[in-house]
Image (spheres, grey):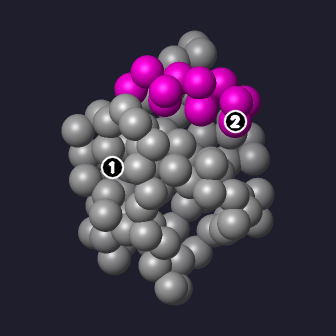
């Protein structure tokens, strides 16, 4: 699934590195050092026209594989969901 997300993002926006906050929280199924996954998630958010200058937290649902991303000191919360094979970003 991670490779599908990365391939999809290649058509949305260039890869951008976003700062990870020193006290950022990650769910147990998201590796803090997986820069490809973190960049893919944040690029999808930014490519959708939203703001994410720094990562505060990332969680991944073990039920459906969807992500929740919190950015900029927990000021922005996004849901990244797989809807029928298409990834969508919504501001929560």
Q: Quadrant of residue 30?
A: bottom right
Whether residue 16 is visible: yes
Which percent across, then down, holds residue 64?
69, 36
Judged by its main secondary structure, the magenta piece is helix
Can you say whether 57 is above or below 68 in the image?
below
Q: Residue at x 53, y 23 (%)?
A: 8
Q: Nearer the viewer, residue 21 or 88?
A: 21
Q: Residue at x 32, y 44 (%)?
A: 46
Residue topped by disc 1: 92
Query: Which range of residues does the magenta coloring cover?
Result: 1-12
Whole-number angstrom distance, CA of label 1 to CA of label 2: 23 Å
Can you say whether 79 is above or below 9 in the image?
below
User: Marks 1 and 2: CB-CB under 8 Å?
Assistant: no
In the rendered image, the quadrant that contains the N terminus is top right
Which percent across, then down, holds residue 4?
65, 25
User: Looking at this rendering, what residue extends furthest in the bottom direction?
Assistant: 23
Which percent across, then down, holds residue 32?
67, 68
Left or right, 30 with respect to 87, comes to: right
Q: Nearer the viewer, residue 47 or 30?
A: 47
Instruction: Give the number of the disc on residue 8.
Output: none
The kind of secondary structure element at disc 1 is: loop
Instruction: Give the number of the disc on residue 2.
Output: 2
Q: Nearer the viewer, residue 14 or 73?
A: 14
Number of other residues with Cα within 10 Å of mark 1, as a class: few under 14, some 14 to 19, many 20 or more: few
Left or right, 84 with respect to 1, comes to: left
Can you say whether 29 is above or below 92 in the image?
below
Q: Residue at x 51, y 18 (%)?
A: 86
Whether residue 79 is visible: no
Q: Is 42 inside the magenta-drawn segment?
A: no
Left or right, 74 with respect to 7, comes to: left
Number of other residues with Cα within 10 Å of mark 2, as a class: few under 14, some 14 to 19, many 20 or more: few
């Amino acid at each position: 699934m991670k490779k599908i997300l990365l391939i999809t993002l290649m058509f949305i926006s260039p890869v951008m590195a976003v700062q990870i906050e020193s006290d950022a929280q990650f769910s147990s199924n998201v590796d803090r050092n997986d820069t490809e996954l973190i960049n893919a998630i944040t690029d999808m958010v930014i490519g959708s026209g939203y703001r994410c200058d720094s990562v505060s937290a990332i969680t991944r649902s073990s039920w459906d594989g969807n992500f929740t991303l919190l950015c900029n000191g927990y000021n922005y919360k996004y849901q990244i969901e797989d809807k029928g094979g298409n990834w969508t970003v919504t501001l929560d």
